[in-house]
Amino acid sequence: MLYESVYKFAKFDYKLIKFIIMNFQLIELAIGLVFVYLLLSIFAMTVMEMISTFLRMRGEMLKSTIEKMLFDKNKNPEKINEFYEQPLILFLGDDVSTSSYLDQLLSKKYKKTA
């Protein structure tokens, strides 16, 4: 009688172990798929960043978005040029390396005339 109860327990335990192992395999598969998806998305993001940097897409998109948000290009295009000629906006350009450029612009603008 004891032997039969141990045998039944062993059968149940075997089914439980098989169930647990099966679930671990599914979890491993899910983790593997998530990892592969993550690697592919990082690779795609890196390639897109390289392309957008090479073609300077980010700057062009920013410029066109600022123009669309702030100004109507058809009504007054001179306002766009005035905006980009402001000292604080000029300071954000590529050819500016130090704050001395900003100091020069501000000193010319606020120079006292006697």
Image: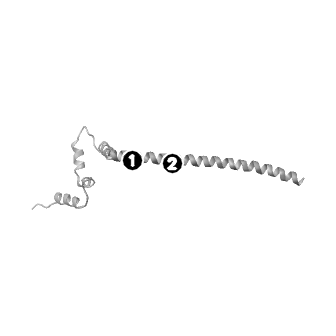
Q: Where in the figure is residue 20, as x and y percent of width and height?
A: 70, 50
Q: Residues within 10 Å of mark 2 (few under 14, many from 20)?
A: few
Mark 2 residue type: Leu
Secondary structure at badge 1 equals helix
Return the residue nearer the eye: 46 or 81: 46
The circle on residue 38 is 2
Residue depicted at x 84% and y 53%: 6
Q: Where in the figure is residue 104, as x and y percent of width and height?
A: 19, 60
Residue depicted at x 75% and y 48%: 15
Q: Is residue 98 left or right of residue 16?
A: left
Quarter holding residue 99 = bottom left
Quarter of the image with the C terminus is: bottom left
Q: Where in the figure is residue 33, as x and y percent of width and height?
A: 56, 46
Q: Are marks 1 and 2 in contact (CB under 8 Å)?
A: no
Q: Is residue 35 left or right of residue 47?
A: right
The circle on residue 40 is none
Mark 1 residue type: Glu
Label 1 sits on residue: 49
Q: Residue furthest top?
A: 74
Count of numbered circles on the image: 2
Sequence-first tag of 1 and 2: 2
Q: Is residue 60 left or right of residue 13?
A: left
Residue depicted at x 87% and y 51%: 4
Q: Residues within 10 Å of mark 1 (few under 14, many from 20)?
A: some
